[in-house]
Amino acid sequence: KTEACHFSRKKADPPLDLGEAPYTGETPLQPVPVLRHLGFYLDKRLSFRQHVRFYGSRAASTAQSLLMLGNSIRGMPPLQRRRLYQSCVVPLMTYGCQ
């Protein structure tokens, strides 16, 4: 798997032609707007917006699925729901925030 991302300080997005790169065969290597490396989503400005957007949506969908476990008729007690939230949702929200 080959991906390339051009990190630039300039506001304008200069075109980047890499030509024929190794291990790509006939298709030229084109830079991608967002690159995933070791679980982090990096864009060309290193703003981590895509990273926050991706893991925020994963945490929100996990929190929505936890609502099904805590219904009022036969659901879990609030203490167990809180532990489940702290062990499943909080690590998703804070991944890479150090």
Image (cartoon, rainbow, N blue to C red):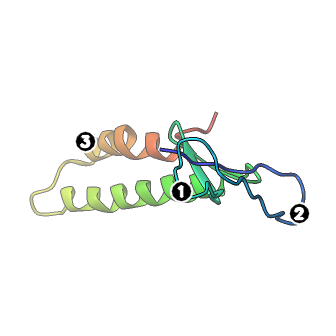
- For label 2, the SS is loop
Seen at 15% across and 55% down, the residue is 75
- The foreground one among 25 and 69 is 25
Circle on res. 11: 2
Image quadrant where one finds the C terminus: top right
Residue type indicated by callout 1: Glu
Q: Residue 77 at x, y = what percent?
A: 20, 47
Q: CA distance from mark 1 to mark 3?
A: 56 Å
Q: Which residue corresponds to the image point at 73% horizontal and 53% vertical from the top-left?
A: 44
Q: Is residue 13 left or right of residue 59?
A: right
Q: Is residue 15 left or right of 59 when viewed as pictured?
A: right
Residue at 77% from the left image edge and 53% from the top image edge: 45
Residue 6 pos. (x, y %): 74, 51
Q: Amino acid at mark 3?
A: Gln
Give the CA distance from mark 2 to mark 3. 49 Å
Above or below residue 74? Residue 1 is: above
Q: Any mark on residue 37, and which?
A: none
Specify which label sits upstream in the sequence, 1 or 2: 2
In this figure, which residue is indicated by the disc labeled 3? 80
